[in-house]
Image: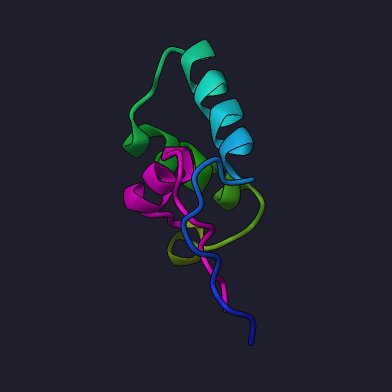
Amino acid sequence: MSEPETFKPGSRWDSLREALQTQRAQVGNPSYAEIAERVAAARRDQGLNEHEARVARSTVYDLFTLGRPRINLD
């Protein structure tokens, strides 16, 4: 199992987060709860059931926060 990535200023993930923030601004700055619901709706449209499609607001918020380490999926 790999070690989780630790905090590093200027993380390689920050460019992705900045792109997400730009896209969010371009569509009117929807709330993180709204983004989570849109993701869940798209996942339901792809055939996932309600439980599998759900995504937490905190997970969405974390995706937009600069300087955060990547979540270790293991």
Which residue is the extreme one toward the front? Answer: 9
- Give left or right: position of 40 versus 74: left
Q: Is residue 73 above or below residue 49?
A: below
Quadrant of the image occupied by residue 73? bottom right
Q: Position of residue 16 (x, y in %)?
A: 62, 37
Q: Quadrant of the N terminus?
A: bottom right
Residue 44 location in percent, x, y? 56, 51
For residue 26: magenta? no
Residue located 41% across and 48% down the image: 62
Magenta stretch bounds: 54-74
What residue do we see at 49% from left, 48% from top? Answer: 40
The answer to whether residue 4 is above or below residue 69 is below
Outermost residue toward the bottom?
1
Q: How is the image coloured?
A: rainbow
Magenta stretch holds residue 66: yes
Q: Between 34 and 63, which is closer to the camera in this rendering?
A: 63
Q: Nearer the viewer, residue 56 or 9?
A: 9
Query: Along the horizontal axis of the image, is 72 left or right of 51?
Result: right
Image location of residue 10, percent across then percent down:
55, 40
The majority secondary structure of the magenta stretch comes to: loop
Identify the residue at image location x=64%, y=45%.
Answer: 12
Q: Quadrant of the C terminus?
A: bottom right
Task: Report the front residue among 63 and 49.
Answer: 63
Question: Picture coordinates of residue 7 (x, y %)?
Answer: 46, 56
What is the count of numbered marks?
0
